């Protein structure tokens, strides 16, 4: 399977989100990544279910919703109803992770678990066989445009090894500091999906930026 490109809508112009969605679809993006932040788990406040619902009306792409919030269980159903195809929660924000993952899947969405840069990979051992996706944060969550943390590359490789050990078919997604150089490194380490914010929406033409990332990923 080729690497999937998931532009992060948080990096787009909020005054023209419809146009932003259109451009990444024209550019051949595979998913639309939606960062949800609550000002508590991370410092920033961003989008809620109503915004996801509005994006769903515009987008043909599956919505990859990343919940960077405390007590995500309270809001999972609302985001799935709003149109999320994938809902990813943070290991660090969830008390009963297996129950949360099961709830997401029972609603018909795919379930992802994200780990922050300082969270050890072995913490995923108890859930590896139950998730559809593992999101490796290659920056500390909360802000767009951060610099890639170099050790994230080896962390992706460790997650790949863990998933193989447990016979899991879960995909590995990487989020943070992705550009044409770092995408090669994470894909070589085992990433299946890369999230790109500034590397897409910070470029003059997001459509050609997506193709440039895809070409770099294929060269890995």
Image: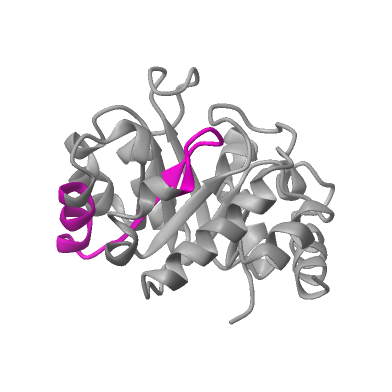
Q: Quadrant of the N terminus?
A: bottom right
Q: Which residues are magenta?
A: 99-121
Instruction: Pick the residue in front: 106 or 182.
Output: 182
* 32 lies above or below 143: below
Quadrant position of residue 185: bottom right
Asked if the stretch drawn in magenta spans residue 27, the answer is no
| Furthest residue in direction bottom, as rendered | 1
Relative placement, left or right, of 102 versus 139 is: left
| The quarter of the displayed image where residue 27 is located | bottom right
Which x, y percent locates residue 175?
Answer: 59, 47
Q: Is residue 99 left or right of residue 211?
A: left
Q: What count of labels does the image hold? A: 0
Residue 202 horizontal/vertical position (percent): 77, 41
* Residue at x 38%, y 45% (from the top left corner): 123
Q: Residue at position x 83%, y 73% from top?
A: 219
Residue at left offset 48%, top offset 41%: 120
- Lateral position of residue 42 relative to residue 203, left or right: left
Q: How is the image coloured?
A: one colour
């Amino acid at each position: 399977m080729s690497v999937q490109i998931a532009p992060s809508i948080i990096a787009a112009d909020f005054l023209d989100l419809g146009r932003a969605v259109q451009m990444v679809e024209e550019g051949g993006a595979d998913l639309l990544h939606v960062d949800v932040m609550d000002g508590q788990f991370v410092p920033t406040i961003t989008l809620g279910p109503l915004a996801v619902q509005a994006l769903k009306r515009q987008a043909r792409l599956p919505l990859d919703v990343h919940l960077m919030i405390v007590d995500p269980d309270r809001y999972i159903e609302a985001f799935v109803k709003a149109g999320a195809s994938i809902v990813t929660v943070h290991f660090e924000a969830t008390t009963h992770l297996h129950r949360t993952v099961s709830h997401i899947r029972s609603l018909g969405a795919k379930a992802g678990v994200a780990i922050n840069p300082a969270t050890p990979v072995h913490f995923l051992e108890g859930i590896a066989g139950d998730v559809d996706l593992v999101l490796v944060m290659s920056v500390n969550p909360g802000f767009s445009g951060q610099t890639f943390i170099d050790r994230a590359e080896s962390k992706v490789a460790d997650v790949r090894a863990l998933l193989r050990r447990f016979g899991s078919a879960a995909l590995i997604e990487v989020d943070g500091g992705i550009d044409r150089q770092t995408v090669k490194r994470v894909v070589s380490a085992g990433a299946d999906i890369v999230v790109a914010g500034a590397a897409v929406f910070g470029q003059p033409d997001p459509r050609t930026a997506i193709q440039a990332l895809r070409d770099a990923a294929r060269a890995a």
